Image (cartoon, grey):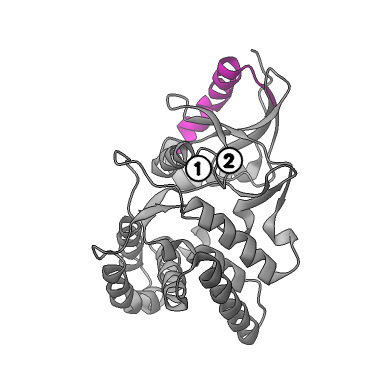
């Protein structure tokens, strides 16, 4: 069905071109026709883009039956493909549902969660951790199929460490590079034969958990990666520590979150600390090859 060409937010244009360069620029030129293709394929009425739009174009839509949904379209790249695959594997267990997808359009039609408040709207930090831990427990119960093409967490590590070693400012990267042997040692333990390698969300934090009036708190935006279960707690814990204003507050948040995740997931606290540490070093290493104002 015909649609009006949307006015793309400047923030979205900036992120898409910075992240993907000329490929992103070419995709942006094609985006109006891609959106038309999505609307024609699924009988959609295109609404406004979401407030959090960055490198992907995400908009609220109305389906032909009157139900609301979310349309997500992106530049063809690994993270988008693995998100599509992970959502198909989860089948809505602990996460918003993938209604349909089209790999040629690189588009996903997703369940819209209402009212869609983010987890940081919950004022109590312990309650936030409890909600996130329960979601992880449900997500981790879904095994990946044997024929999956998802990356391993160690693949992420290698990419991040390559960024750190490529940093033009040795002092900026030195602290992270010094920790790489320690992280690699932890990862060897977490990849031993008796350690289950499961499907991880890969990016579960306060802004990737939304409320729904019927389904309760649900995850969104999985990265889709394979690894030890404890590696999935790091993103949330490190994000939570960012809410602390002093070192003492950050330490208190860390200890409480570790306790909660350990209790809910039934894993010892040492594993929770290991997961948080590995994710912190990896996340901080990503993008070090770029200038600080570009990252």
- Farthest residue in the top direction? 1
- Residue position for label 2: 13
Say which element carries label 2: helix
**263 vs 60, nearest the viewer:** 263
User: In the image, which disc is placed on residue 163?
Assistant: none
> What is the span of residues highlighted in magenta in the rendered image?
24-46
On the rendered structure, is 237 left or right of 149?
A: right
- Residue position for label 1: 17
Mark 2 vs mark 1, CA separation in Å: 6 Å
Looking at the figure, which quarter contains the N terminus?
A: top right
The residue lying at 62 percent from left, 82 percent from top is 252
Which SS does the magenta portion mostly show? helix
Say which element carries label 1: helix
The image shows residue 266 at horizontal and vertical percentages of 48, 68
The residue lying at 46 percent from left, 61 percent from top is 232
On the rendered structure, is 102 left or right of 116?
A: left
Can see residue 7?
no
Q: Is residue 258 above or below residue 96?
A: below
Can see residue 132?
yes
The image shows residue 80 at horizontal and vertical percentages of 45, 40
The residue lying at 33 percent from left, 40 percent from top is 148
Quarter where residue 120 is shown? bottom right
Quarter where residue 3 is shown? top right
**289 vs 209, nearest the viewer:** 209
The image shows residue 144 at horizontal and vertical percentages of 37, 45
Within 10 Å of the Cα at label 2, are there few (<14), some (14-19), or many (20+) other Cα atoms? some
Within 10 Å of the Cα at label 1, are there few (<14), some (14-19), or many (20+) other Cα atoms? some
User: Could you tell me if the residues under marks 2 and 1 are in contact, i.e. CB atoms within 8 Å?
Assistant: yes
Q: Is residue 122 above or below residue 63?
A: below
The image shows residue 8 at horizontal and vertical percentages of 65, 35
Q: Is residue 276 above or below residue 31?
A: below
Residue 121 is inside the magenta segment: no
């Amino acid at each position: 069905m015909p649609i009006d060409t949307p006015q793309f937010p400047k923030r979205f244009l900036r992120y898409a071109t910075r992240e993907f360069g000329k490929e992103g620029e070419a995709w942006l030129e094609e985006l109006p026709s891609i959106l038309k293709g999505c609307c024609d394929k699924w009988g959609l009425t295109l609404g406004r883009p979401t407030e959090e739009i960055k490198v992907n174009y995400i908009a609220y839509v109305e389906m032909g039956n009157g139900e609301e949904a979310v349309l997500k379209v992106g530049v063809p790249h690994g993270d988008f493909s693995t998100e599509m695959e992970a959502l198909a594997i989860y089948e809505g267990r602990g996460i918003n549902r993938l209604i349909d997808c089209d790999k040629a359009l690189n588009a996903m039609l997703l369940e819209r969660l209402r009212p869609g408040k983010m987890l940081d709207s919950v004022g109590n930090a312990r309650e936030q951790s409890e909600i996130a831990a329960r979601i992880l427990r449900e997500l981790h119960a879904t095994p990946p199929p044997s024929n999956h093409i998802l990356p391993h967490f160690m693949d992420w590590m290698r990419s991040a460490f390559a960024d750190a070693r490529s940093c033009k400012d040795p002092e900026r990267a030195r602290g992270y590079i010094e920790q790489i042997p320690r992280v690699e040692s932890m990862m060897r333990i977490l990849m031993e034969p008796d350690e289950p390698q499961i499907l991880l969300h890969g990016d579960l934090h306060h802004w990737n958990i939304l409320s729904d009036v019927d389904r309760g708190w649900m995850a969104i935006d999985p990265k889709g990666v394979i690894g030890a279960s404890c590696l999935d707690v790091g993103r949330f814990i490190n994000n939570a520590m960012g809410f602390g204003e002093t070192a003492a507050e950050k330490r208190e948040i860390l200890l409480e979150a570790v306790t909660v995740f350990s209790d809910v997931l039934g894993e010892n606290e040492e594993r929770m600390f290991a997961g948080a540490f590995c994710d912190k070093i990896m996340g901080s290493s990503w993008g070090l090859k770029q200038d600080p104002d570009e990252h």
